[in-house]
Amino acid sequence: MTILRRWLRRPIILAAENNNNGPWGNGGDDNAGPRNPWAVPPGGRRNGPKPTALDEFLKKARGGGGFGGGGGGPQLPIGANARALWAIGVALLVGLWILFTSIHQIGPQQRGVVTYFGRYSGELEPGIRLTLPAPIVDVTKVDVEQVRTDEFPQDGGEMVLTGDQNIIDLAYTVRWRVSDARNYVFEIKDPQQTVRATAESAMRAVLATTTLNEAIGAGRTTIEARVAQMMQQILDSYQAGVRVQGVSIKQASAPSQLADDFNAVTAAQQEAVGNLNNARSYSQQVIARAQGEAAAFNQVYEQYRLAPEVTRRRMYYETMEAVLARTDKTIVETPGVTPYLPLDRARRLPEPGAEAPTSGTPATPAPAQGGQR
């Protein structure tokens, strides 16, 4: 193409050289007419800025000066120079691509899952590792030491039905990490969503067999352990390469819409428990008293077997004493009724041997009433 352009341009150049009366003149005589502005001046130099280094490079690239030095050497065609530049650029890009896709830096907590044309090939240990460039070999970095925490629910409350047909407002967290990088990458499509779905399913299954009092009371620890165990069994069946670290229940309470009714039910349950405890305490007291009386009766019966008449009379006296101690006493004799002498109010006689009163008034003895006993 370059040679053809030169041959097509040659007649035009020859015609312009032979035409001395053209619009630009002959270019050599100052008085012969207008000068050609693009013609080289007589001194061989144009008035204008000096060529820059970029101009020199472009001139050499076009073959004007040659890459071998000097202007007399063979000149390369313009198309060949462009192809050479494109080849250099492509070679640089390919080199950078190979450099960045062949060297892999694996962190201390990471494992590199290697695939050869999409097929699993092995794992890379921590450090700087070399492989074939992409897309021949692809390396996926997986953090196997980081403990991830998922919170449930993400928005609002989560209503869960318990085994005794009650509803609780539940909030909990699940901690897990990667245990097998190969299974984590290949066996499940979305590990994060799989773990979340498994946690929700296990929590609802466990609470379906748990009462409300256990869920909001001391049974939380048991529920957390059962949920973690069920989650691990499900994930192992999926070969997910995930290890459950633990489950923590943050909130387990009645829904806000039923808070008043729930409090009333709770108060009634507590009152019922209190009444039941009081009844048990009273029954234990009655039983203890009855057992004591039975033991005392057995002792009396043993004495009665040894001396029946004496024991019978003694029991009669003790019974009469217990009965008459709480009633007023009256003795009935002929010809009338005389009240019983109040002994606690009578003046006590001086003890024998005691000194007589020193006052001149003799002591008046208590009046004696006949018929009193």
Image (cartoon, rainbow, N blue to C red):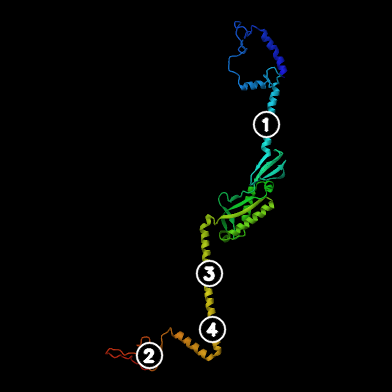
Q: Give the image location of residue 331, x and y in percent.
A: 40, 90
**Which mark sits nearer the N-terminus, 4 or 3?**
3
**Which mark sits nearer the N-terminus, 3 or 2?**
3
Q: Secondary structure at mark 2?
A: strand
Kindly report which numbered mark, 4 or 1, lies closer to the viewer in this rendering: 1
Q: Give the image location of residue 295, x and y in percent.
A: 54, 81
Q: Secondary structure at mark 4?
A: helix
Question: Which amino acid type is shown beneath numbered disc 3?
Answer: Asn
CA distance for labels 4 and 2? 39 Å
Question: Which residue carries the number 1 mark?
Answer: 92
At 52% from the left edge and 72% from the top edge, which residue is drawn? Answer: 281
**Which mark sits nearer the N-terminus, 4 or 2?**
4
**Which mark sits nearer the N-terminus, 4 or 1?**
1
Question: Which amino acid type is shown beneath numbered disc 4?
Answer: Phe
Q: Give me the disc on residue 338.
A: 2
Q: Give the image location of residue 90, x and y in percent.
A: 68, 30
Question: Which residue carries the number 3 mark?
Answer: 277
Question: Which amino acid type is shown beneath numbered disc 2?
Answer: Thr
Kindly report which numbered mark, 4 or 2, lies closer to the viewer in this rendering: 4
CA distance for labels 1 and 2? 143 Å
CA distance for labels 4 and 1? 115 Å
Kindly report which numbered mark, 4 or 3, lies closer to the viewer in this rendering: 4
Question: Which amino acid type is shown beneath numbered disc 1?
Answer: Leu
Q: On the rendered image, what quadrant is the C terminus found in?
A: bottom left
Q: Secondary structure at mark 3?
A: helix
3 and 2 marks in contact (CB < 8 Å): no
Question: Which residue carries the number 4 mark?
Answer: 297
